[in-house]
Image (cartoon, rainbow, N blue to C red):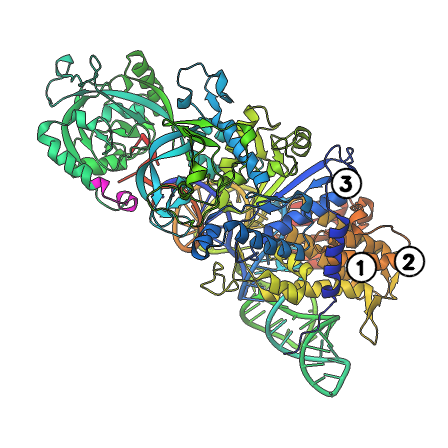
Amino acid sequence: MSERRKPYPFDQFEPKWQALWEKEQSFHAPNPGEKDFDSRKPKFYVLDMFPYPSGAGLHVGHPEGYTATDIMARYKRLSGCNVLHPMGWDAFGLPAEQYAIKTGQHPAVTTRDNIAKFKSQLKAIGFSYDWQREVNTTDPRYYKWTQWIFLKIYNSWFNPETTRAESISTYRGDDPDSVRLAYVADVPVNWCQELGTVLANEEVVDGKSEVGGFPVVKRPMRQWMLRITAFADRLIAELDGLDWPESIKLLQRNWIGRSEGAEIEFVTVNGREDESGSGGLSKPSGQLGSIAAIRVFTTRADTLYGATYMVLSPEHPLIDQLTTDECRSAVNDYRAAVASKSEIERTDLSKEKTGVFIGAFAINPANGKNVPIWIADYVLMGYGTGAIMGVPGHDQRDLEFARRFDLPVVPVVQAAEKTREESIGFLEDGVAMNSGILDGLATPDAKKKIISWLEENGHGRADIRYKLRDWLFSRQRYWGEPFPIVWEDGKHSALSESELPIVPPELDDYKPTGTGEPPLAKAKEWVLYSDQARRETNTMPQWAGSCWYYLRFCDPQNDERFVGEEAERYWTGGEAPGGVDLYVGGTEHAVLHLLYARFWHKVLFDLGYLSKPEPFQRLVNQGIILGEDGQKMSKSRGNVVNPDEVIALYGADAFRLYEMFMGPLEQMKPWSMRGVEGVARFLARVWRLLMAENQAGEWHLSANVTNAAPDKAQLKITHATIKKVTADIESLSFNTAISQMMIFVNAFTSAVAIPLAAMRPFLVLLNPFAPHIASELWETLNRKFADAEGDMTKQSWPTANEALLVEDEVEIVVQINGKVRDRVTVLMSATDDEVKEAVLASPRIHALLDGKSVRKVIVVPKKLVNIVVS
RNA sequence: GCCGAUGUGGCGAAAUGGCAGACGCAACGGACUUAAAAUCCGUUUCUCGUAAUUGGGAGUCCCGGUUCGAGUCCGGGCAUCGGCACCA
């Protein structure tokens, strides 16, 4: 097959411009105080989610968001902004480590190779990143500061008085380790045997690891945790000031899962059903004088009178103490059975409710009645108090359980527009009944009343609970940041900042031990910190590096501070709560990276290291690009599109333009090679508008290009295009901006003379989208005409002249009863009455109205007239 | 089950409550060419009709409503996709 002829010589000028941009460092943004910094210009920080440099290289999904931000960056620069547009590498992670296990090659080597490949691919697309600001999370100069931030977190606590993170030195209690924002806990964690590591809740999907899809089991282990739950309220509340998609805000709110309700104490009665009162209360052994009480959390305290039984989670600590001898063997059997179940089995909704009675009773504080205590696996130890009051009258799960085990069902809320029977099992608002002091109260009032009654009588209090768990922050992996922590006599302590970075030791064998002991433990000498102290051998999760990279971009070479104060203040400055002006990336990070980064940011903000409470002001999620078959791209389906091939065939400009022309940025959409061809044709038309080919096949500036003035229509479309493209870029509607540029070019293709005054602004508009061809044509024009100076990067964004867009006349659509029947042309200045007159004068309309009576005439100025007839 | 997003030609998609389908792809017809490719011009929602056009009717997932007028707003469904999921 012979090589297909290029419609325009992109293969010659695209590499030329890329090389020139690199040589001139055209997109380097100096920091305040540096040479060439212009303090008069406003700043604009436009950020991409930096990629994990995998061995497979870029796929067409990456450049979708990257092209959008690049258009924005180039547009803002031409509009007179100092633009921060950086790129880097989130390079710690499993694939490099697993490759190391297979081949023995050090992950750093694999990572370096992959980064080189990614970088060359990004450069071939012509992105205008400031490469002087490149960061790499696996570089000791970078992770030194990741470890430094960990020390800040370790050395602080959340002061409930101020609701702020503060230095641990302000803590007045006797056990600082119990309040640190980074702490060690023995907790049931997600253990993945195949990966040889524990995982965060966020990394477990349907009981399997997000990476690799391996089974995950709960297993108690000693782990580092970060106290993100302390920030739950602020993480919810401070979403309000952000320009994020509502759906993403909602996802975060749901993930944090704030529930307002009450904690209620049920006093227990061991083994007695019929008597209530003090005589039956048990005195738990070892806790002399205290009465065993079960605390439950509920969002519907108003249904307390309907609580006819209690259920404890099988892991609840009071079970041993409360279980009667008759019930003990059944209880133990049940607990053993539950313990052997996997997470998936346990949370299978379709299965029937199970549980056993433990022989004990508790007193419902509202009505003094004794209720039986059960254990069941539908109650989870991890949420609330690990115990519930069973209200089968108004909870579907409790109702199923009560029916299964024949427990009494008492309806206590009459929902509006429902009969008593219909209200059963549903948790709707209504009016309280069968509820003593609450009878007749609407649900919100009933809640308030019962909670104050509980507080007055010492049976409970208002309470707020969250689904969000503290963040499990340690991993049993080699390829991650080591903790700046040592252990001595079973106690952890922080290394000093001067010892950073803590560099991981060299290993011959990166394999996980399989026992939960981290691979770093194999480096015996490294572990020996001193005669007494041993190094922490866990490493941080991949999220650590990506939690703060946007800050490092502001000042990436700084070895004295994680980010210089002035640089941070300048690049994240402004009125809004968030610092990054535009952040574009995939939805897959809605609750992981975006929540973790906000958390770290708030800690650093509270401690006085940052000027804004939020990291990202405006967030946009690009949609997934599907294969040509409309299916998700995957190697196994064989529908993966490789950017390198597209660029070789059609050029980088066509690739960029197609990525943006496919459809709205946020939308999921399928790839189409034909579509790429379409935009390539458009770019070729742009080329031929200004260029002509001689006999030898060489291109030169077309003789049609003239500095004579454009005609009125040409001027008008030029300014209409400036207006539309500008507005569309601002609203990230790149597909319609491109449509408008196509309309512009179509309007000029048959013109004999191609006026410079139209082409100059057009090339500037085209430049953010297709910078190579725009730069090349600009340069060609400069060689002949002296009306402009400098290359494309030195130009200013054109402004639309509204006066040129004003029409003398306008075509009015004439409707009869909402159906279009005619059009008339009237002067722009015509009054409503004049328009009406002109419409009624139309012979066509006159004929159609014959014999009908006109009831009303609606005139929409400059648009339409609707005649309503009967 | 709960929450959210989306539903428009053969396809990707446009449309501050005011001409539905801009722009592009594909298809068809034509010009150029020995021929093909490329390029340029034209047609292209469906349907009925005419010798002819600025002809008639229907049409934005379905049912209903508000309005002079609804793809757009409101109510109720259906479908697809995404998130959460025994969270008390």
Q: Nearer the viewer, mark 1 or mark 2?
A: 1
Could you tell whether A701 is left or right of A473 in the image? right
Secondary structure of residue under mark 2: loop
Quadrant assignment, res A689:
bottom right
Q: Where is residue A233 in the image (x, y as percent from the top left)?
A: 46, 27
Quadrant location of the N terminus of chain A in the rendered image: bottom right
Residue drawn at the location 22% of the way across and 43% of the way down: A340
Residue type, numbered disc 2: Ala
Residue at the left extreme? A326
Q: Mark 2 lies on which chain?
A: A
Residue under circle 1? A777
Mark yes or no: residue A210 visible. yes
Residue A577 covered by magenta stretch? no
Which residue is denoted by mark 2 in the rendering?
A: A708
Q: Is residue A640 left or right of residue A437?
A: right
Pointers 3 and 1 within a single chain = yes
Closer to us: A148 or A486: A486
Q: What is the number of the mark on residue A80?
A: 3
Q: How crowded is mark 2: few (under 14 residues within 10 Å), some or many (20 or more)?
A: few
